[in-house]
Amino acid sequence: MSTTLADEMAARLHARLQPSRLEVLDESWQHEGHAGANGTGFGTHFRVRIAAPGFAGLRRVARHRLVYDALADFFAERGVHALAIEADD
C-alpha cells in the first residue's frame, strides 16, 4: 500500500495536534492551470478539516497557525502550494 502526501500530512497532524476529527483532502485537480499547480493534479492544493481539543479558546488565526506550523516542511520541501483550513474545537 502506498502512502499519499495527504496521508503523510494527516499522520503529522495526528501526531502534533491529537485531533478528534480530521480529513485531509487533495484538491489539486481543481486548481490545474492555477499558480502552484504541478500539472499532475496531485500534491499541491489541500483542504484540512480538523477539530482538536487544543483549539478550545483559540481564535481562528491561532488555530490555523498551529496547522500551518505542523505542516511547514510540506510547503518548504514537498511542493504543497495552498492549504484551506476548516478548524473547530
Image (cartoon, rainbow, N blue to C red):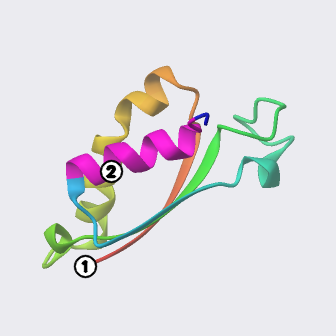
Q: Give percent across and percent down for residue 72.
A: 36, 34
Give yes or no for residue 86 being in the magenta stretch.
no
Magenta stretch contains residue 14 = yes
Residue under label 1 = 89
Which residue type does callout 2 highlight?
A: Leu
Q: Amino acid at mark 1?
A: Asp
Residue at position x 70%, y 54% from top? 27
Residue found 13% across the figure and 79% down from its top: 57
Horizontal side of residue 22 vs 47, given as left or right: left
Q: Quadrant of residue 73?
A: top left
Q: Residue furthest front?
A: 1
Q: Which residues are magenta?
A: 3-16
Q: Say left or right for 23 vs 13.
A: right
Residue farthest along the top direction in this orientation: 77
What is the spatial separation of the Cα atoms under label 1 and label 2, in whole angstroms?
A: 14 Å
Residue plotted at (23% across, 73% down) = 59
> Does dot 1 land on a helix, a strand or a loop?
loop
**Which quadrant of the figure has residue 55?**
bottom left
- Name the residue located 28 percent from the left edge and 73 percent from the top edge: 20
- Which x, y percent locates residue 44? 65, 38
Closer-to-camera residue (25/44): 25
Q: Residues within 10 Å of mark 1 (few under 14, many from 20)?
A: some
Disc ID at residue 13: 2
